[in-house]
Image: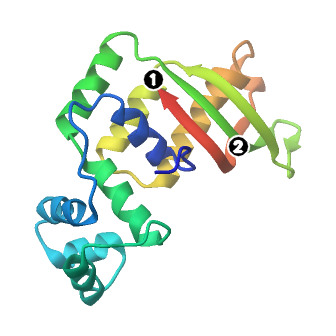
Amino acid sequence: MRLSANTVQEALDRADSRHWTRMPPHSTRARLNYLLRQTRDETALARLLQISSADLNTVCDTGRIPSDHPLHQTVEREVLRRWQPRVRRRAHDAILANGGQMMLSFRAWLGFTAAAGSSDDPRLRFLSLSLTPPYPERLFTAQHNESPEAELRTILSDALSACYFHRDRPAHTRESVSLERIDFLEFYY
């Protein structure tokens, strides 16, 4: 398993994994069986993994995928995304009931748009900060609704604008922030 996430969805899934009560399956065969039970159809599983049905049957028969193969990471990511959904929701509800704050550490290239114009040159930033309400709730809701990565990035960009760059500025002087490229991202809650 890679130690850092470079998508918002993966970073949320990794943060959720700290709340699990049981570990997910380790072997490729067990992971594929779990995903097959979740999708209930081999065709749907093949579509989810972005492979053909014939390739899925081959992988299921052998039960092995080299750890450096992209399919290995895809299977791992999909298992992490679906493992213990009730535990995940309980953790999210507890976080939101207790003030709804989460910590975020990231290194990313950020673009800025201000009243005087825009910055065409994204700047690399390494930041650790606390996301305040309503942004954790928006991220959790989008995650539960299986929103696309672009929507999660938009929510995170809005959160960065509000929680870091605009703490003491009036609303009419605020610039917008966009995540151009994420190198490292980690949530703590």
Mark 1: secondary structure:
loop
Type of amino acid under label 1: Pro
Q: Is residue 86 left or right of residue 132?
A: left
Q: Amino acid at mark 2?
A: Ala
Q: Residue reaching furthest bottom?
A: 54
On-image quarter of the C terminus:
top left
> Is residue 112 found left or right of 42 in the rendered image?
right
Residue 132, above or below 42: above
| Residue 28 sits above or below residue 12 on the image | below
What residue sits right under mark 2 in the picture? 108
When the figure is inspected, residue 159 is found, relative to residue 45, above or below; the finding is above
Mark 1, residue position: 134
Is 103 left or right of 113, judged from the image as shown? left
Q: Is residue 137 above or below residue 79?
A: above
**Percent from the top left, x then y, of residue 20?**
26, 32
Q: Position of residue 67 (x, y in %)?
A: 44, 66
Q: At which x and y percent is residue 143?
A: 36, 43
Q: Quadrant of residue 61?
A: bottom left
Residue 40 location (% of width, % of height): 10, 66
Q: CA distance from mark 2 to mark 1?
A: 22 Å
